[in-house]
Image (cartoon, helix red, strand yellow):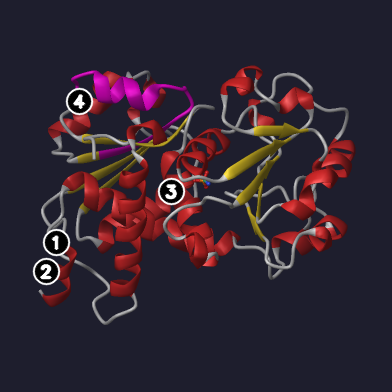
Amino acid sequence: MKKHLLSINDLTAGDALEILNTASELAKISDGPMKKLPTLRGRTVVNLFFEDSTRTRISFESAAKRLSADVINFSAKGSSVSKGESLKDTAQTLQAMGADAVVIRHGASGAAQRLADSGWISASVINAGDGTHEHPTQALLDSYTIRSKFPEFRESFDGLKVGIVGDILHSRVARSNVLLLTKLGAHVTLIAPPTLIPVGVTDWKVDVSYDLDSIINKVDVLMVLRVQSERMADSFFPSEREYSRGYGLDLARLNSLKESAIVMHPGPMNRGLEISAESADSHKSVVLAQVSNGVLVRMAVLYQLLGGAALAGEVSA
Ligand code: CP
């Protein structure tokens, strides 16, 4: 695996499967008596968050602590960034504190790449979401969750049908998931109003539909995306009511999914807009499993990037 994880394009299918398999091993260990592993003792992981986060920030912190790393949490709010300190000076300050890995979330697409290419720091850089570009660990935890629900697709997603519905245009989760799901062999259909489909989608290895009702009973996985109002300067649909009517997962649509199908959402959810409360809380929903699996997958990523000791040795240590 490369030094940094900036994009799913940094991973081969084999690299991705290795991360998912490592997460499965870590899940087995976590079920045993030893909850905390000494693997990254003496290492420092910095969480550098310039944008809000609940799940990603907390799960990276939990993952690093479960591997015995020291953790520094940095949030732009309340830091010297609000006094005008640059990314370079912030990064170099963290480097001086001895960071081995920097987990960065930033509102600008390409910020993680900039940090990795800059030479300002020697640490591994992990992209925890950059603008509308990518969120690779979200895609990895989503694939881990799919594998855990469909063991028959453990080695490959060949034959798996995934629908991704919602605000594709602004979604880094959609971009990373399209790259990873198709790399692993899944067939992906993007479903959204034409205004929320990116212009360059013809270059993606996906089908596109504007009609959720014609697709819904064909998919094994329905991934519902948040409507990202905070990134919308213009109006992308006539009203929230019309959006929900066309693209929201309500009870009627939930009932038209295959019996075996699962519903995913990366969170945070806009209940009543892209997903109804009944759908979010239904037995088909794996939203909370996605959150739990996020810790295991981020442990696996830190473990792979920072070169932890062999897991077998850890268990017997
Ligand atoms: N899925 C996700 O990235 O959630 P947070 O914004 O809460 O980290």
Name the foreground residue: 314 vs 96. 314
Q: Nearer the viewer, mark 3 or mark 4?
A: 3
Q: Secondary structure at mark 1?
A: loop
Q: Position of residue 182 (x, y in %)?
A: 51, 40
Mark 4 crowdedness (10 Å alpha carbons): few <14, some 14-19, many ≥20? some
Q: Residue at x 69, y 26 (%)?
A: 197
Mark 3 crowdedness (10 Å alpha carbons): few <14, some 14-19, many ≥20? many
Question: Label 2 belongs to which residue?
Answer: 313
Question: Label 1 belongs to which residue?
Answer: 310
Of callouts 4 and 2, the N-terminal one: 4
The numbered mark at residue 92 is: 4
Task: Specify start and end residues of the magenta stretch as a single range.
Answer: 102-120
The residue type indicated by label 2 comes to Gly
Q: Position of residue 281 (x, y in %)?
A: 70, 66
> What distance separates the C-alpha of mark 4 from that of mark 2?
35 Å
Q: Vertical placement of 167 versus 213: above or below?
A: above
Of callouts 3 and 1, the N-terminal one: 3
Question: Label 3 belongs to which residue?
Answer: 140
> What distance separates the C-alpha of mark 3 from that of mark 2?
25 Å
